[in-house]
């Protein structure tokens, strides 16, 4: 089982460049989300989606866009990268109903450096 | 602001010592509670979760957590830690439906270092 797949694993950008972090899951999960992880700050929610065509902002949405055209895919776009966006990004998904609902399944993470 | 708080930033223990990591949340109503663990260089994995029922929840690897509704707490415990428990531990909450419902909000994390 592939679970949650994120690409790329590492990326270096210059300030002002744009890029897209890809996330795909094969578990038919309705809920998908993006977090960034920074030392001493835990995981902070950037954007999330409860189904295809539905997205909403999390705790730190500024500078990021998302879309959810299919159940499987939830890309995260950085429109104009800034050094403050240097972080490790995790995509995560979960069921929303049933006994297994609530548990998040995480991708391996994407380490982004903005120079 | 409503939040999830982990009061211990870094805990250092010797092997066989007992562990208790604090977690408090500030949401009213019914919440779902989780503890996740992140081993060095890896992504987060679920340790245990509480939705309803017995407030003492047992998870994997000998961990347990107690939900105390009156204290808005969900502390993680282990009677005897091992060197392999060295990791970062995150408490997380799904707030009540209608109040940021559906999102999983994480605490700041507690780094646990176990000395052999």
Image (cartoon, coloured by chain):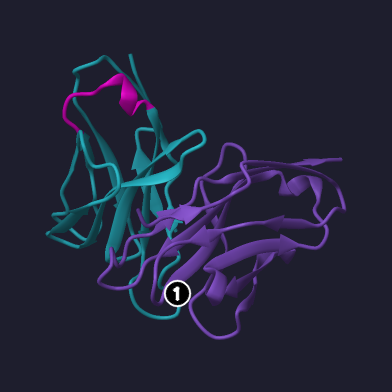
So how many labels did they put on this image? Answer: 1
Q: Position of residue B100 (x, y in %)?
A: 28, 63
Magenta-colored stretch includes residue A85: yes
Q: Is residue A9 above or below residue A105?
A: above
Chain identity of mark 1: A
Asked whether residue A2 is in view, the answer is: no
Q: Residue A35 is drawn in which quadrant?
A: top left
Chain purple in the figure, letter? B
Q: Nearer the viewer, residue B101 or B38?
A: B101
Q: Is residue B38 above or below residue A53?
A: above
Residue in the image at 45% along x and 71% along y: B32
Magenta-colored stretch includes residue A13: no
Q: Label 1: how many residues lie within 10 Å, few (<14), some (14-19) or many (20+)?
A: few
Furthest residue toward bottom: B53
Q: Position of residue B23 (x, y in %)?
A: 57, 58
Residue in the image at 28% along x and 42% along y: A60
Q: Residue A70 is drawn in which quadrant?
A: bottom left
Q: Quadrant of the C terminus of chain B?
A: top right
Q: For mark 1, what is the residue?
A: A100
What's drawn in magenta, residue-wise? A78-86
Q: Nearer the viewer, residue A8 or A60?
A: A60
Residue in the image at 31% along x and 53% along y: A33
Q: Position of residue B91 (x, y in %)?
A: 53, 57
Task: Please name the color used to draw chain A.
Answer: cyan
Residue B33 appears left or right of A91:
right
């Amino acid at each position: 089982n592939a679970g949650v797949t994120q690409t790329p694993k590492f990326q270096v950008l210059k300030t002002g460049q744009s890029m897209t972090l890809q996330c795909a899951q094969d578990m038919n999960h309705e809920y998908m989300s993006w977090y960034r992880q920074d030392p001493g700050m835990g995981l902070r929610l950037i954007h999330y989606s409860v189904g295809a065509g539905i997205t909403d902002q999390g705790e730190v949405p500024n500078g990021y866009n998302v879309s959810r055209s299919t159940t499987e895919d939830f890309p995260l776009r950085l429109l104009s990268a800034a050094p403050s966006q240097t972080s490790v990004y995790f995509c995560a998904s979960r069921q929303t109903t049933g006994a297994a609902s609530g548990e998040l399944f995480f991708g391996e993470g994407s380490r982004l450096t903005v120079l | 602001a409503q939040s999830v708080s982990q009061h211990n930033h870094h805990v250092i223990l010797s092997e066989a010592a007992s562990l208790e990591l604090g977690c408090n949340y500030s949401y009213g109503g019914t919440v779902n509670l989780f503890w996740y663990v992140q081993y060095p260089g890896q992504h987060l994995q679920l340790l245990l979760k509480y939705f309803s029922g017995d407030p003492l929840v047992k998870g994997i690897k000998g961990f347990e957590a107690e939900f105390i509704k009156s204290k808005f707490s969900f502390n993680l415990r282990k009677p005897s830690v091992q060197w392999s428990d060295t990791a970062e531990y995150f408490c997380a909450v799904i707030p009540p439906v209608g109040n940021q419902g559906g999102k999983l909000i994480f605490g700041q994390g507690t780094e646990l270092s176990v000395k052999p």
